Image (cartoon, grey):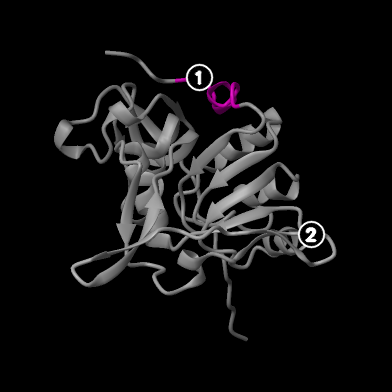
Amino acid sequence: MLDKSYNSAADAVADIPDGASIAVGGFGLVGIPAVLIESLREQGATDLTIISNNLGTDGFGLGLLLADRRISRSIGSYLGTNKEYARQYLAGELAVEFTPQGTLAERLRAGGAGIPAFYTKAGVGTQLASGGIPARYNPDGTVAEYSPEKEVREFNGEDYVLEEGIRADYALVHAAVADRYGNVVFRKTAQNFNPDAAMSGKITIVQAEKLVDAIEPADVTLPGIYVDRVVEVGPQETGIEFRTVSE
């Protein structure tokens, strides 16, 4: 069996080129492959297309790449509270393709499963299907690019919109445990988008808090067939996105 372990996160992301498309796991602050993202930041790749639910938060995760102007296009669901994400989008510095969360998860999974497209009810009757959502603005606030119209087809008397699967050049994923052959165990809600992102990547890189020699087959969440590289990063802290303190 092939040993897929790498000595460092820097080595694992060293060949990611400018212009690459990258699927990234995580949701909010949970399950973020932060060590891989930081290593990619140091590596210097730019003009990236990032496929992720959101682009991190200000000063953390993908928010760091965003602040460095390293992301040119985002495929995701949620601008959230990342002020820089919203600013770059409205200023015409970043193209954004909005996708419902469930549809995004299925687009990633479908791409990894070899399914080029599928029909879903999500978005029927909205601009997601008919097109016309601003994807990129000009600096003067006018719209430079709109989302395209998508095919809508009737099945059993109901309309469904066609969505394409996503096959990313790379995927960056966080896991609790991985073995040297790429088998992975996710912990609780850190599973979120990580399995789907892992399936989507042509080259999938996993940061694992713990690397072991082998995982019992019954305990495997994601089989190693989807994983190309694994690096051990040690325990990772999950921060607090919103802190409310009483007087």
Q: CA distance from mark 1 to mark 2?
A: 44 Å
Vertical placement of 238 versus 212: above or below?
below
Q: Considering only vertical position in the picture, is 167 above or below 84?
A: above
- Judge left or right: residue 187 versus residue 220: right
Total number of numbered discs in the rendering: 2
User: Residue 141's image quarter?
Assistant: bottom right
Compare marks 1 and 2 and give the one earlier in the sequence: 1
What main secondary structure does the magenta stretch of the protein show? loop
Is residue 247 depicted above or below 161 in this figure?
below
Residue 166 visible in image: yes
Q: Position of residue 230 (x, y in %)?
A: 42, 27
Discs 1, 2 touching: Cβ within 8 Å: no
Q: Residue furthest left?
A: 218
In the rendered view, tell whether residue 238 sits above or below residue 205: below
Quadrant of the rendering where the C terminus is positioned = bottom right
Helix, strand or loop for disc 1: loop
Seen at 18% across and 31% down, the residue is 216
Check disc 2 and report its element: helix, strand or loop: loop
Identified by mark 1, the residue type is Asn
- Outermost residue to the top: 1
Q: In front: 235, or 202?
A: 202
- Residue 103 spot, x, y in % from top left: 38, 58
Which-is-in-front pick, marks 1 and 2?
2
User: Which residues, given as a range, are shown in magenta?
Assistant: 6-16
State the quadrant of the N terminus.
top left
Q: Which mark is residue 138?
A: 2
Q: Residue 117 versus residue 3: which sits nearer the camera?
A: 117
For label 1, the residue is 7
In the rendered structure, which amino acid carries the disc numbered 2? Asn
* Residue at 31% from the left image edge and 22% from the top image edge: 181
